[in-house]
């Protein structure tokens, strides 16, 4: 489990706010105005990070329960290989998000 600042995080026009504290400034006033939409999209993505992290954990845990004891059996057309690869990728991504190498 990571020790990041808990959500909810909120995006305004140029910042990602946690309570009254600015977590990130995503809008550079020296950049051309067409980047404003990109900055807003970045702020929204960053603000959604705590919920995305929790959703990823839930999906990973549910997939693990679903596949517990399962194996790939190509002879009868049952293959969990893609699911197992997704679980491994999810574990690696979550470890990075939680600050583990």
Image (cartoon, grey):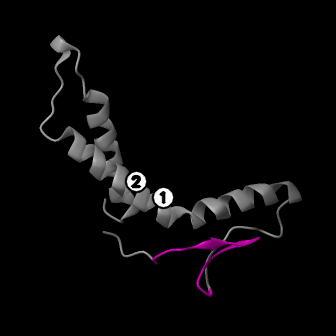
The picture quadrant where one finds residue 18 is bottom right
Q: Main secondary structure of the magenta part?
A: loop
The crowding category of the residue bearing disc 1, from other C-alpha atoms within 10 Å (few below 14, some 14 to 19, many at least 20), is: few
Q: Where is residue 80 shown, x and y percent of the image? A: 25, 29
Above or below residue 90? Residue 79 is above
The residue labelled by disc 1 is 52
The picture quadrant where one finds residue 70 is top left
The residue labelled by disc 2 is 56
- 59 and 6: which is toward the camera: 59
Position of 16 compared to 98: left or right?
right
Residue farthest to the right, as pictured:
33
Position of 69 compared to 5: left or right?
left
Q: CA distance from mark 2 to mark 1?
A: 6 Å
Label 2 close to label 1 by CB (< 8 Å): yes
Q: Residue at the spot x=31%, y=59% of the render?
A: 101
The crowding category of the residue bearing disc 2, from other C-alpha atoms within 10 Å (few below 14, some 14 to 19, many at least 20), is: some
Give the secondary structure at mark 1: helix
Residue span colored magenta: 5-20
Q: How many dots with numbers?
A: 2
């Amino acid at each position: 489990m990571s020790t990041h600042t808990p959500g909810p995080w909120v995006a305004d026009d140029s910042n990602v706010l946690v309570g009254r504290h600015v977590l990130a400034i995503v809008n550079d006033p020296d950049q051309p105005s067409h980047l404003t939409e990109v900055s807003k999209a970045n702020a929204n993505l960053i603000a959604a990070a705590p919920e995305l992290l929790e959703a990823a954990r839930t999906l990973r845990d549910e997939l693990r329960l679903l596949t517990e004891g399962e194996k790939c059996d190509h002879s009868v057309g049952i293959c969990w290989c893609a699911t197992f690869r997704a679980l491994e990728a999810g574990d690696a991504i979550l470890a990075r998000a939680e600050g583990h190498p």
